Amino acid sequence: MTNLNRFELLLQQSGGKPFVFDHDDMRTLHFDHQYIQSAMSISAPDKLLLSYTRAMMGFLLFQAAPKHILMVGLGGGSLVKYCYRNFPAARITVLELHAEVIALRDQFMIPADDQRLQVIHADAAAYMQARPENSVDVVMLDGFSADGPASELNTSGFYKACLRSLTPQGVLVSNLWDRPTPAVPAIAQALLGTDWRIWWCRTEDSHNYIAFFVKGNDAGVFRPVVLNRAQKLDQRFDLRLSELVPSFQLVKHLSEEA
């Protein structure tokens, strides 16, 4: 049976639920036939294979020693595993709406819950509204449905709740996928009257736009300072942040489209 035939059979058997597909050393998560939701090397399960996941780790350029990381969207757990292995002092909370995705965590070799890691079956929109202020250092938004970014996460109320939960030096990093336009009005409304700034980038080999919400970064000194940080981080982690920094752009007006 060819890989295509095996995939079509798994798709048919899934009954519309998330499913796993293995091809050589690659294990992928799918919601349908259109997109790969997550990818893992079976022989190196903690490695970040997809460039957008490495880009999202760019939060380290702004917050290098997070004590509490909150992630929205479990998927195949690439970011969860990477942070769990590389930041032993950090506590990680993951919100996942779909129980069927959580049920696949063992197949993606995601560590079991412990004192440092908690995967919660929850509606992130409701959860973040109840989240205490100044309670997390990093919020990573990577919540998707089969059709793209979850619409309930593209509201001004949700972005306000995420920003409110951050500590003073906190960072919100959001995967805006390849169509950031739907999120722009919500983000604009959420940032009215605040001093949050947005730096965004797009990796060369993916269609994903990644936005970083930070405070107090002077655009005039941003690039040399952050490039220096990236070079130091690249000596510790296999993230290639030095290649990413030159593509960073400051969103000067919230009506700008990435």
Image (cartoon, rainbow, N blue to C red):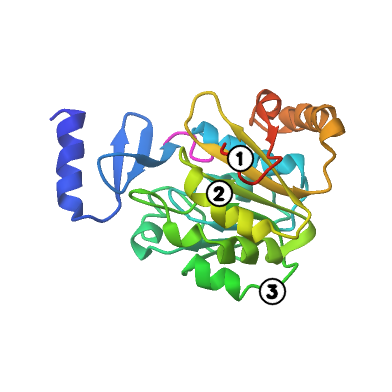
Q: Which residues are magenta?
A: 42-47
**Magenta stretch, overall SS:** loop
Q: Measure the alpha-carbon separation of dots 3 and 1.
A: 31 Å
Q: Is residue 116 left or right of residue 26?
A: right
Q: Secondary structure at mark 2?
A: helix
| Residue drawn at the location 57% of the way across and 36% of the way down | 258
Q: Measure the alpha-carbon separation of dots 2 and 1.
A: 8 Å
Q: Do the residues bearing badges 2 and 1 touch, measured as CB atoms within 8 Å?
A: yes
| Residue drawn at the location 52% of the way across and 73% of the way down | 126
Q: Local crowd at mark 1 within 10 Å, few (<14), some, or many (≥20)?
A: few
Residue type at the position of mark 3: Pro
Write down the residue under mark 2.
Answer: 184
Viewer-proximal residue among 87 and 192: 192
Against 146, residue 162 (above or below) is below
Say whether disc 2 or disc 1 marks the residue closer to the N-terminus: 2
Residue 98's x, y, as percent?
A: 38, 63
Residue type at the position of mark 2: Val
Q: Nearer the viewer, mark 3 or mark 1?
A: 1
Q: Nearer the viewer, mark 2 or mark 3?
A: 2
Magenta highlight on residue 27 = no
Residue 149's x, y, as percent?
A: 44, 50
Q: Local crowd at mark 3 within 10 Å, few (<14), some, or many (≥20)?
A: few
| Residue drawn at the location 53% of the way across and 36% of the way down | 52
Say whether disc 3 or disc 1 marks the residue closer to the N-terminus: 3
Q: Secondary structure at mark 3?
A: loop
Write down the residue under mark 1.
Answer: 256
Write down the residue under mark 3.
Answer: 132
